Image (cartoon, rainbow, N blue to C red):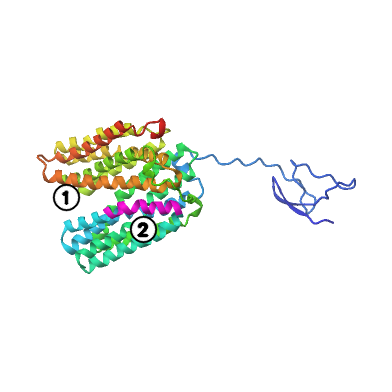
Amino acid sequence: MPQPDLTLTPAGPALAPRYRPSAHPADPPPAPRNRPAAHATGPGPAPRNRPAAHPAAPPANPYLRLFTRPGTRAFTAGNLIARLPVGMFGVSAVIMIAAAYGSYALAGAVTATGLAVGSVTGPLIARLVDRYGQARVAVPATAYAVLGHLVLLLCVHGKAPVWALFLTTAVTATTPNTGGMSRARWAHLLRDEPDALHTANAFEQAVDELCYMIGPVLAAVLCSTLFPEAGTLTAAVLFLGGTLVFAAQRSTEPPVSPRTTAGTPLRAPGMAPLLAVFLATGAVFGSMEVVALAYVDGPVAGPVLALQAAGSCAAGLLYGRARRAARLRTCLAAMTVLMAMPLLGASTGSLLALAAGLLVAGMATAPTMVTGMGLIQRLTPPAQLNEGMTLAVTALLAGIAAGSAGGGWAADHAPFASFGFLIPVTAAATALTLCATTGVGRRNGNMG
């Protein structure tokens, strides 16, 4: 007798006899396809036909739908852990250096040096990521940056010469753009789903705001309650561990692009004026932070300033649920108007009014950044996506540095208390003017 085969039936796996290719009159006819085969153990009642299981309906919430895709939860969790220290390193370094050397000016100069060097190395590291892959480049670059932070910690703890601090902080500039790598994964996974990609970009922006809310507070608590170096040490561990988890998720990593002769993404049509808009937008953020801190000048300054990030986070999540994105010019116009709210609140002399003004002003931040990053993704060739988004971040950082300097000057030379809040409004109006005059963000043509 022929050996039985295992076959799948509506009732589950069953053993059915193996039939010869040519039917013999004595052989029983094969069972119909829509009827379950008899079980090999003997006669018995035929299993009842069960209705076919219908696949579960996708979640109604667009953010939950993002994470139904395999691998997205794992790489998002790793990236979140790796991105949190970005908001911790700067505050931790300032507290650590100021406690050891008694100079906030030195602490600010050292952190500014790392920021300046990073603006040069960042696009270069992103280009390597595009060429060789996220895991191959991000892990050694992160390890090298973490080593630099730990050496800086040891130099500060041992009160090394000042020149050693500047030299060491330059080593930390190999930090990869973790947020850009996460956005690149979403762009790869959702390349044929523009609505879902819009939601993913909004989620990423909300994560940025969340990290910039929690990171500085966590760093300040660790440095003040434990020891001055605790913030840097914790941030280094989180940064390396999160990057390792993120890089291990190879199934969602964008494929490595062959070496391109296109040169820098700056040559893409519309990219240069869009980066100029990012530069002016960064000046909004940098000036608002310094001006608000100088105006409040107390222990509540941090929580009050965090309200701007809270407003941005909430607005970003709501914006991600919208079915279509607004034009960049519309977002910048809303930002220009809303950035006047802190000015009005500060003019009243009420701290509560200023806090409310910052909360409202923050609501224009995330929609503007989501729309701008969406344009970057459309203007940048797919083979250079990490580099293009890192250029945008570099422009933002340069704007933040310029805005911080302008805000500090305004705070020191203000003819009246709320004078400094004119700087963010002016920077937002500049970004709007650049967008309108250059045509960045148009829905037709190469401008997006």
| Residue 220 marker | none
Residue 49, located in which quarter of the rendered image?
A: top right
Left or right, 119 with reference to 198: left
CA neighbours of label 1 inside 10 A, class few (<14), some (14 to 19), many (20+): few
Q: Residue at x 22, y 41 (%)?
A: 355
Residue 374, located in which quarter of the rendered image?
A: top left
CA neighbours of label 2 inside 10 A, class few (<14), some (14 to 19), many (20+): many
| Residue 298 marker | 1
- Start-end of magenta stretch: 116-131
Q: Position of residue 346 (x, y in %)?
A: 16, 38
Q: Position of residue 4 (x, y in %)?
A: 78, 55
Give the overall secondary structure of the magenta segment: helix
Mark pair 2, 1: CA separation: 30 Å
Q: Residue at x 36, y 48 (%)?
A: 390
Q: Residue at x 78, y 41 (%)?
A: 32
Give SS at disc 2: helix
Left or right, 291 with reference to 131: left
Left or right, 271 with reference to 401: right
Q: Is residue 374 visible?
A: yes
Quarter of the image with the N terminus is bottom right
Give SS at disc 1: loop
Q: Position of residue 11 (x, y in %)?
A: 69, 47
Let me know if residue 226 is in the magenta part.
no
The type of residue carrying mark 1 is: Gly
View extreme (right): residue: 25
Quarter of the image with the C terminus is top left
Seen from the viewer's position, the closer of residues 21 and 12 is 21
Q: Position of residue 38 (x, y in %)?
A: 77, 48
View extreme (front): residue: 261
Q: Which residue is mark 2?
A: 239
